[in-house]
Image (cartoon, rainbow, N blue to C red):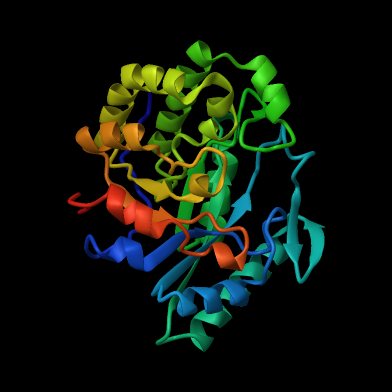
Amino acid sequence: MDNKQPHKGDKRHKMKNKNDIFECDCHVHPDYSIDARGRAEEFVKEAIRKGIKRICFTTHIDLDPILSVYDPYIRVRGRLYRLADEYIIAYKNELINLKKIYEGRIEVIWGFEFSYGLHFEQKIRDFVEKFRPEFTIGSIHALDGIEITSSRFKDLARRIFEANSFIPKYYDMIVSLAASGIFDVVGHIDGYKKYLGLHWGISRCEELEAEFLPQIAAELKALSMPIELNTAGLRRELKSTYPSGMALKILLEHGVRVATVGSDAHSPEQVGEGFDIAEELLKGVIYD
């Protein structure tokens, strides 16, 4: 792949030590994300109640021109609006205000989870340079113009994609995401398993990952691109983190760093869920 760049993400919120990553929920969707519910302050209060010291809001932004017809909205004060600068600024300002209100009780970080694709990479870069979020997650939510993590399109994705061709292409896109240098972490690196993995069978996915992931991990390491450990799959039929245990083992063995843990909460009560299992999975791992 040409023009690979070392990761240049914002380092202000890099975890200071190996225990730090369990003190921050670094993947949280307040109701600015249209598939989430609960105001940002509700998430903050729940995080404080659970003893979490830092919370990072990562409202979903999808700039894919192919899919924008399905998801061009952001929710502000309970109403849906087409994505526009004024609403991004409103989001930022609310979280900056919460920083001030809860200073000394919890650290509030504002950021975004971006859907990634090569054909709109520059749009993401321009967005990040314009708004300068404190934290950015890059995730693959669609391939070849078909959403793979949405319940709306799971049946279509299952009909069209076949494991042998999909999985190597998917992970090549992960490397492109990393090579962009835009993001702080890769989000739910094997998130395709949410629907496609269950359809094909997890054992089949793991067979293919055993073949492809070592090389992908080597490329991520060379790009200094860390990943998150996402606990959302534990709440679903999958009953596994992203990455799953086997994929996580391969990535760690080949030098990929887990930089953050995120619940991928879409409602306040989900904040910090699954962190006990995440900590068990990462027991004995050096993070820095």
Q: Is residue 79 left or right of residue 27?
A: right
Q: Name the residue at 53% across, 27% down.
A: 197
Task: Name the image quarter holding residue 180.
Answer: top left
Looking at the picture, how far across and down is residue 174, in whole percent?
44, 32
Task: Name the image quarter holding residue 124.
Answer: top right
12 and 230: which is toward the camera = 230
Task: Name the image quarter holding residue 54.
Answer: bottom left
Query: Which quarter of the figure is the N terminus placed in?
Result: top left
Q: Is residue 140 visible?
A: yes
Asked if residue 199 is positioned above or below residue 122 in the image, the reply reads above
Q: Is residue 230 left or right of residue 217?
A: right
Q: Is residue 10 visible?
A: no
Asked if residue 252 is positioned above or below residue 78 in the image, the reply reads above
Asked if residue 222 is positioned above or below residue 259 in the image, the reply reads above
Q: Name the residue at 45% across, 59% down.
A: 135
Q: Name the residue at 57% across, 44% down.
A: 236
Looking at the picture, how far across and down is residue 25, in whole percent?
44, 63
Query: Which quarter of the figure is the C terminus placed in?
Result: bottom left
201 and 149: which is toward the camera = 201
240 and 71: which is toward the camera = 240
Q: Is residue 14 left or right of residue 264?
A: left
